[in-house]
Amino acid sequence: MVEENLRIGVFVCDCGLNIAGSVDTEEVRRSAEELPDVVVSVRNRYTCADPGQAEIKRHIKEHNLNRVVVASCTPRLHELTFRKCIEDVGLNPYLLEMTSIREHCSWVHLYDRESATKKAKDIVKIAVARARLLQAQQEMEIPVTDAALVIGGGVAGIQAALDLADAGHQVYLVEEKPSIGGIMAELDKTFPTMDCSICVLGPKMMDVGRHPLIKLLAYSTVEAVSGYVGNFKVRIRQKARYVDETLCNVCGKCSEACPVVLPDEFQQGFSSRKAAYIPFPQAVPSAFLIDMEHCLGNNPVACVKCIDACEKKCIDLHAQDKITEVEVGAIIVATGMDVYDPAQLDEYGYTLFENVITSMEFERLICGGGPTEGHLVRPSDHKTPKRIGFIQCVGSRTENRGNPYCSNVCCMNTVKDSLLIKEHDPDAEIFVFYMDIRAFGKGFEDLLRRSREAGVRYIRGLPGEIREGPVTKNLLVKVENTTTARVEEYDLDMVILSVGLEPKANLKKLMSVLNLSQTSDGFLMEAHPKLRPVDAPTPGIFYAGCVEAPKDIKDSVTQAGAAAARSSILLNAGVLKGEAIKAMIDLDACTSCGVCARVCPYGAMKVDVKAKSGAQLVVAACAGCGTCAAECRFDAITMQHFSDAQVLAQIDAALETDPEQKIITFLCNWCSYAASDLAGVSRMQFPPNNRFIRTMCSGRVDEKFILHAFKKGAPLVLLSGCHLGDCHYISANHWTMRRADKLWDKLEKLGIRPERLQLEWISAAEGPRFAQIMRQLEEMRQKVTPEEIAHARKVISERKLSAKEEAAPEDELSDVAKV
């Protein structure tokens, strides 16, 4: 329902020269003031700055505005800013329409000012068309559960848990291994301060174990998460340890009695452990456990020697996994990373030569708590190596059998390791083979200088060949030294591969549970790389440590503190205002068919099909994806703030002039729209013929929207969303795919080429792919003939469907309802 006296204000931003450099913003402003119901059109240099916001407020008061359109940067950046701005002067925040003429126009059409200006005028016209139909919305208040879940017990998870608990919040710390500590517990020293790693970390681990507000769930995994920000329900599986950690006094008699000998993972396989073991002396929880995969008690004939040896009687070989369910208001993901396995690199001989080891293996060899008690020896003969080489960037900064990114810690870790060797043996000769040394942090350059002064030689060049002496087991390393422009050969006792970091192998599973996205490097994608670097795109979830990107201990702890602070702000709020984007049911039109209940990923729709009492919405559970509205063939569901009328008005405005030149592009807010923003930020150029329409989810795109676009003369329509399995709304985009499949069949029956409707899954990190798709679509558009466009307009205009034909039969839904 449209107000009779609409008074719309349009505010066009120059953003310095970011927009005005490629778009004639004054012409855009003049064009906007000619649009129906626009009473004022203003151009600002920086609309988001305080003077720009003050001008918006002034015009709202002076002109009695009841709708506001801001044409500037992406709404994903400043929509909340401008909502707060208009709310300050008494306007409902949902009466704002923000549209991007920067990421979607000026930055992607840098060298075509005329076309960029024409497109910007269209973008504003589309925004005004939607603004005319905006309605005031009421945000619901959501009570917040004052508890947090921290997933991962490395240094980042430990710090985040302690910060939250010290702030008075209940914390559940989940760690998949038997002890917290993570990678840091395995290091000998840390850079640049050269502190003993476990001496720094150990007390914090004990603080976690003793804190009254931290419930430590070691040897556990998160199996399922449901709910929403402020009210997450989490199911945790705690694997059986077979030793009661509350009774175990760490006497070690079970381990002494155990006959099973296994490689010790903590010591990188350089020593052994038993099937009854404690991960390392400083482990928290401080208790033994049984490795049941290798325990003889798991075989038909039970060994039970550990049970006989245990005086406390705390071993139960029949113990079962425990399922714990908790409710939390915030979640911090701090699951860390994996260390790159160089076994796939043939040229460095890691799997061939005993004396080629990784930097993590070196950490245990040099450590006083390691298998050799800190005496550096080489694996083949346990002799002290006198000539040692380090090879940098193993598994990093390479496209072949590795990762393209810099792992951030390898250079300084090698500098640290070289000084550790010099501490043990000042006469040792050390050679570091590198392409670039990145000493960017506080104290890093000083540490590098100390290493050089200690006599460590830095050879600019990566080895092309390593051979082993058959008798001496020494390693002959051939390298092209780019500083001297000579090929040089070094006879070394031992070679250490400085391996990089990569995403955890099981990260995909956790991403599925939490509905998270990842970057092209495989690490988790943040909501905004600069302004919200610790926030996940999903509200209420935050990142800490290397799960977001490779980083050192200091940066991991810093990010953990930031994530804890962000979580604490949320938990302290007590009550949150939730988005007003919810479904609304017209009970008079509802037939109680139950389709909406079947397609809702959150179970927010309840329908009694037998009673025919109409669908009922559990408002707090509704996430606003709009899939129910798109699937309802009786138009009984309206999506607040993304109504049918608003979307159809945008299509009409986009295709009002020269429709045959334009491609209607539906973008889901969380992935494909974010990818379009990334393409813009990256200044990736593509043709200016696209016209974007944002929906919260691709599942919101109704068949009628696509048919309407063809009816209005669009040559092509792109429907885009998150990759299957990565949908922000769990499984909503499965219905998008099904809807597109059915529509392709209908188009073909109508004599319309199905290829004119394109379906693409584009993640938030795929800016380059988004730009490429835009270029491909323009090539396709040029091949659509005027006759095809005219035929589509005619047959769709003449086509009438009955409600029965429109309604999806129940048997068609049965298979997909299981998604």
Image (cartoon, rainbow, N blue to C red):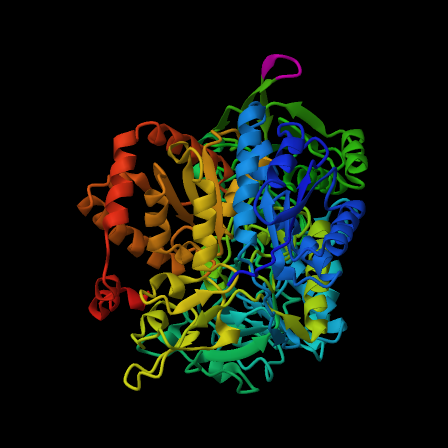
Judging depth in this view, the residue of 319 and 66 nearest the camera is 66
Q: Residue furthest top?
A: 485
Q: Residue at x 76, y 49 (%)?
A: 53
Q: Quadrant of the C terminus?
A: bottom left
Q: Position of residue 446 (x, y in %)?
A: 81, 36
Residue 460 appears in the rendering: yes
Q: What residue span does the magenta drawing correspond to?
A: 482-487
Total numbered labels: 0
Q: Is residue 769 left or right of residue 715?
A: right
- Height in image: 315 above or below 286? below
Q: Position of residue 510 (x, y in %)?
A: 48, 61
Residue 356 appears in the rendering: no
Judging depth in this view, the residue of 451 and 80 nearest the camera is 80
Query: Is residue 486 in the magenta section?
Result: yes
Quadrant location of residue 484?
Answer: top right
Q: Position of residue 440 (x, y in %)?
A: 74, 36
Q: Residue at x 67, y 57 (%)?
A: 83
Judging depth in this view, the residue of 169 and 703 nearest the camera is 703
Q: Is residue 709 left or right of residue 17?
A: left
- Height in image: 428 above or below 153? above
Q: Residue furthest front?
A: 4
Q: Position of residue 606 (x, y in %)?
A: 39, 79
- Main SS of the magenta segment? loop
Quadrant location of residue 87?
Answer: bottom right
Judging depth in this view, the residue of 183 and 739 nearest the camera is 739
Q: Is residue 508 left or right of residue 406?
A: left
Q: Residue at x 68, y 39 (%)?
A: 13
Query: Is residue 206 in the magenta section?
Result: no
